[in-house]
Amino acid sequence: MFFSQYGAPLSEFPLNNGGKVYRWRGGETMRTLPAEYTTIGTADPMAGKTTTKTTTTVTQPNSSTTVTETRTTMSGVTFGGGPQQVMVKPARVEALFCEAQITANAGGVITNIEATRDTDGEGFSLSRCAEVFGVKK
């Protein structure tokens, strides 16, 4: 019944007691993981700031005239740059699967299932085998 539900075994080995040990692999799927980034550098408190400078000049071209001139200038200041995002791992695709050794007695009744290779689960599970077999905590 197990193999009709979960798929045929990869191989089988007879035991002296009439039982068998099966090597099985299933639950195969692919998962795409996004790229991972980290932030380097520190924020520059002066980045993007604007400075304003006002200058007043008073001149007297002749004894009866006084000229007052005021100039205001504004300029943006950018120093260095701030924090930057740097990729530490590119996007990738992972194969998820479960491999198990399944022992059955002479009557074909499964007496033991042992995970021999297991990947992370598809969701938040740490075990693809636990997901495939429906193991609940």
Image (cartoon, rainbow, N blue to C red):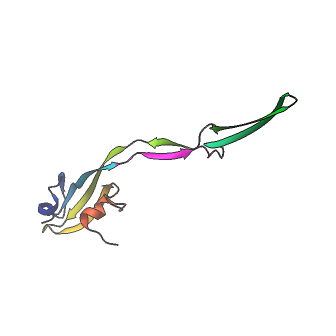
Which residue is found at the position 28% from the left and 63% from the top?
131
Q: Residue furthest front?
A: 64
Q: Residue furthest bottom?
A: 137
Which residue is found at the position 19% from the left and 67% from the top?
110
Residue 24 falls left or right of residue 66: left
Q: Position of residue 96 (x, y in %)?
A: 29, 52
Which residue is found at the position 23% from the left and 61% from the top?
102
Q: Is residue 51 above or below residue 97?
A: above
Q: Is residue 15 visible?
A: no
Q: Position of residue 116 (x, y in %)?
A: 31, 56
40 or 27: nearer the viewer: 40
Residue 112 falls left or right of residue 45: left
In which image quadrant can residue 69 be found? top right
Which residue is found at the position 33% from the left and 54% from the top?
119
Q: Is residue 84 visible?
A: yes
Residue 39 among those drawn in magenta: yes
Q: Residue furthest top?
A: 61
70 or 121: nearer the viewer: 70
Location of the C terminus by quadrant is bottom left
Q: Is residue 82 above or below residue 11?
A: above
Q: Which residues are magenta?
A: 33-44
Q: Is residue 36 above or below residue 104?
A: above
